[in-house]
Amino acid sequence: MALFMVLIIPLPFTIRRKMFTFISENPLVAKLQYGLKITFIFILILFIDSVNRVYRVQVELAAATENAGGSGRASIMGHERLEVQARKFYSQRNMYLCGFTLFLSLILNRTYIMILEVLRLEEKIKLYEGTEKNTKQAEKLAAAGEPGEIARLKQSLAQVKQDNDALIKQAAGLHREYDSLSEQYAQTQGDGSLLKKSN
């Protein structure tokens, strides 16, 4: 439960990334995870054994009740019944404890995997948007392709837009110049035609 609380505590992205990078790379933590897996295998064996004991105690209690019949019920209500009930209680307690421990271990493992996946996806988003500064930490967490691809494309798109605006302004200026030159040419042609007519 303490490990689960450490995993789900809300931390900033950089601290959480460093923590999970440390967990995934540290050889001591890897040995600890290996030891926990072996421990959970033993707990699974204990759970199967406790289920078997609960079943045997239930069968024994049913057989004792059946053998007692109608007249001998008082004898089974005494010391023997208390002993069987105590064994039943202990075996059920062990079964529930082992079962809940196994369930919590599965939840812990699944939560760890899901948090790693969320961190990898956040890392990919930051890399594609180009907002990630610490690319070495990002590569350690997961290899996510070319860094800043979207940012690079946005920069090239902005450059193309600037070039396009410059060309539009240049074309407008050339069009104005052409209009003024064509007006001047028309005036000179008009003046020349007038001179020819007068001659």
Image (spheres, helix red, strand yellow):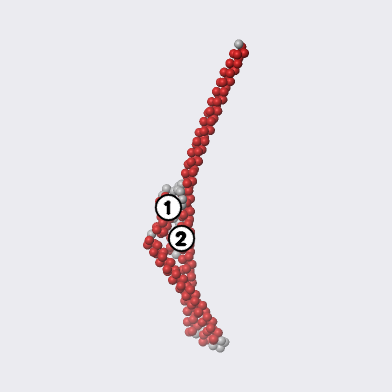
1 vs 102, nearest the viewer: 102
Residue 92, visible in the rendered structure: no
Locate residue 65, reporting x and y percent: 54, 84
The amino acid sitting under disc 2 is Tyr
Q: Residue at x 42, y 52 (%)?
A: 139
Label placed on residue 35: none
Q: Which numbered disc, 2 or 1, marks the residue closer to the eye?
A: 1
Locate residue 196, reporting x and y percent: 60, 13
Locate residue 100, reporting x and y percent: 48, 69
Locate residue 156, reporting x and y percent: 48, 41
Of all residues, the one furthest to the left in this rendering is: 28
Secondary structure at badge 2 equals: helix
46 vs 199, nearest the viewer: 199
Which quarter shows the C terminus? top right
26 vs 50, nearest the viewer: 26
Disc 2 crowd, CA 10 A, few/some/many (<14, 14-19, 20+): some
Of all residues, the one furthest to the right in this rendering is: 197
Which quarter shows the N terminus? bottom left
Name which quarter of the figure residue 67 lies in. Answer: bottom right
Of all residues, the one furthest to the top in this rendering is: 199
Label placed on residue 139: 1
Secondary structure at badge 1 equals: helix
Marked residue nearer the N-terminal end (2 or 1): 2
Q: Residue at x 45, y 73 (%)?
A: 46
Q: Residue at x 44, y 71 (%)?
A: 42
Q: Is residue 158 positioned above or below 134 on the image?
A: above
Residue 118, visible in the rendered structure: yes
Q: Which residue is mark 2?
A: 112
Q: Is residue 94 positioned above or below 129 on the image?
A: below
The amino acid sitting under disc 1 is Glu
User: Mark 2 and 1 residues: CB-CB less than 8 Å, in contact?
Assistant: no
